[in-house]
Image: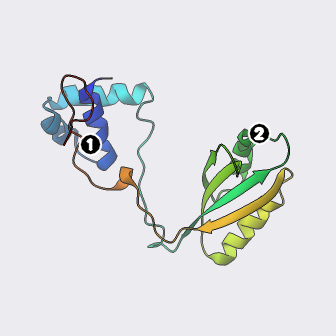
Amino acid sequence: MDGLDRRIIDLLRDNARMPVSEIGRVVGLSSAATGRRIARLEASGTIQRYVTVVDEAAVGGLDAFAEVRLSGETSGDSMEPIAQRIPEIAQYFVVAGDPDVLVRFTVDNVEHLHSVINTIRRLENVVGTKTLIILSSWDRRRTARSPVRRDPGTDRPAAV
């Protein structure tokens, strides 16, 4: 991966629907060369998928986190089959310290939230939870920004 690949990735992070011709114009490559680079990044797994970012509040959803504490020697990695069974779970993070796992999920309303938390609490190895409702959020990856300028000598972000 070189500096051009990183610039292409930065542009796609900002707008995954940006036309290849526009990406090529910004990075100084032809559309064909840019398309080949994107295809290579996809084939290597560097670009894993393209998603639509939805404002859950606008469609009536409620985002929340649950801190989950597991019993004894239970591994946080045991959450994957659980997450796959509970469709409201969007992500989970195995973390160092207390709690063992941080779960992010989307529900329809507070009553639905209560139901999902109770489902998690009833799991065999769960000894406790703490729920955090997201009131607002900001995500650098989902905020329009200028492409990162890189120092040509080191390929690191250039000093401003």
Instruction: Using the rendered view, name the quadrant where residue 3 is placed.
Output: top left
Secondary structure beneath label 1: helix
Q: Which residue is mark 1?
A: 11
Q: In the depicted view, which residue is nearer to us: 81 or 135?
A: 135
Disc 1 and disc 2 in contact, CB within 8 angstroms:
no
Q: Earlier in the sequence, mark 1 or mark 2?
A: 1
Answer whether residue 121 is visible to the viewer in this image.
yes
Give the alpha-carbon distance from disc 1 to disc 2, as whole Å.
37 Å
Instruction: Using the rendered view, name the quadrant where residue 68 is placed.
Output: bottom right
Q: Which quadrant: the C terminus? A: top left
Badge 2 amino acid:
Ser
Residue 40 lies left or right of residue 116; in this view the side is left
Above or below 58: residue 9: above
Check disc 2: other Cα within 10 Å, few if <14, some if 14-19, many if 20+.
Answer: few
Residue at point 28%, 55% (across, down): 144
Residue 136 lies left or right of residue 32; in this view the side is right
Q: Which residue is mark 2?
A: 75
Residue 27 lies left or right of residue 130; in this view the side is left
Badge 1 amino acid:
Leu
Residue at point 61%, 76% (across, down): 109
Residue at point 37%, 50% (across, down): 141
Q: Nearer the viewer, mark 1 or mark 2?
A: 2
Give the percent coordinates (x, y) of residue 90: 59, 54
Secondary structure beneath label 2: loop
Check disc 1: other Cα within 10 Å, few if <14, some if 14-19, many if 20+.
Answer: many
